[in-house]
Image (cartoon, rainbow, N blue to C red):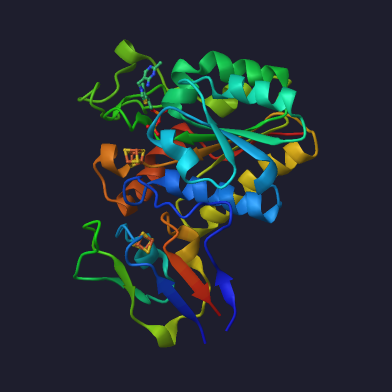
Amino acid sequence: MQKVYSRPKGLTDAEFAYCAGCFHSVAHRMIAEVMEELDIIDRTIGVCPVGCAVFMYEYMACDMIEAAHGRAPAVATGVKRVLPDRIVFSYQGDGDLASIGTAEIIHAAARGENITVIFINNTTYGMTGGQMAPTTLVGQKSTTCPSGRDPKQAGYPLRVCELLATLDGPSYIERVAPTNPAGFNRTKKAIRKAFENQLEGKGFSLVEILSNCPTQWKMSPIESLKWIDEHMTKTFPPGVFVDR
Amino acid sequence: MAEIKIDRERCKGCELCVHFCPKGCIEMENGYNRKGYQPSTFVKRDKCTGCAICALVCPDVAIEVWR
Ligand SMILES: Cc1ncc(C[n+]2csc(CCOP(=O)(O)OP(=O)(O)O)c2C)c(N)n1
Ligand code: SF4
Ligand code: SF4
């Protein structure tokens, strides 16, 4: 027998501190696998978010920097411009990227910065206790909208891929839903392409991963996958928005 | 011939591997690991094809696969 799956070299030995079934773990592992496949672990620099993934530097075998909340694309821009031979990615939740960091992501995309952005949309502020996020669905309950998001009071969810796709800067934008094995494969492929684009100097690439937060959604991990399919994909349809 | 190994201490009992294994080779254990989770366990060696779907979906990278 031959070994067909081992722990990727892009990860350290540390155990993830995330909740059971959380897709932060899945996304970390896929980034690690892609770094190993492309043989770029030694020259990759990741920028951690503020949010549940704040300790991402404990888990990744590449270099990592911590950015202030939402500023990861600005930090990544600086790193990439000073060290253009490095592969630079930011990793951000929806509170980080689509709320406090809206300006940074829009301008990094508009500049066509040659960086890779992995965007974890779990429709909530997981770390701080499940508050409403810019991506919380209409009618979805959270600790700050306990009877469901009411557009009259809180407006509508922000569709980041669609918004950024109106700009000329981005070279690749895709939204994926890893809710079954095919979706997991699609997600890995998208992450790989987002890194390959940077290696080819194509410019700004962003992958939005429709993710779960079983803890704040108060669901089992399996239920959370069904909820992504049945509800999240209606507001956030998966697909390729830019590829050039 | 195929084989998987589940790292009982890394497993958080999320049940994704149990749910997605196309051959139903994995079940949840009754006991608890040091973290206090009920881990999954490989029960049907003879049915396993080594497709590695369990490893593909495991968030905690707790599964190794041989084929
Ligand atoms: C400048 C600043 N404002 C607010 C906070 C509090 N805070 C910590 S994490 C977070 C939101 C995290 O949500 P998200 O980015 O969706 O990540 P998740 O935890 O869901 O993975 C906030 C508002 C902070 N740490 N720094
Ligand atoms: S609170 Fe939510 S996002 Fe944070 S680790 Fe737990 S499941 Fe993941
Ligand atoms: S997918 Fe991984 S963490 Fe979840 S029950 Fe199976 S082995 Fe455990």
* Residue A71 in picture, x, y percent from top left: 53, 19
Left or right, residue B43 beside residue A98: left
Quarter holding the N terminus of chain A is: bottom right
Q: Is residue A215 visible?
A: yes
In the image, residue A173 above or below residue B22 = above
Quarter holding the C terminus of chain A is: top right
Displayed-image quarter of ligand 1: top left
Between A3 and A190, the one nearer to me in the picture: A3
Identify the residue at horizontal 74%, vertical 29% (top origin). A203
Q: Is residue A187 visible?
A: no
Left or right, residue B43 beside residue A33: left
Between A86 and B53, the one nearer to me in the picture: A86
Identify the residue at horizontal 24%, vertical 22% (top origin). A145
Left or right, residue A90 beside residue A81: left
Residue B37, by quadrant, is bottom left
* Residue A116 in picture, x, y percent from top left: 64, 34
In the image, residue B51 above or below residue A139 = below
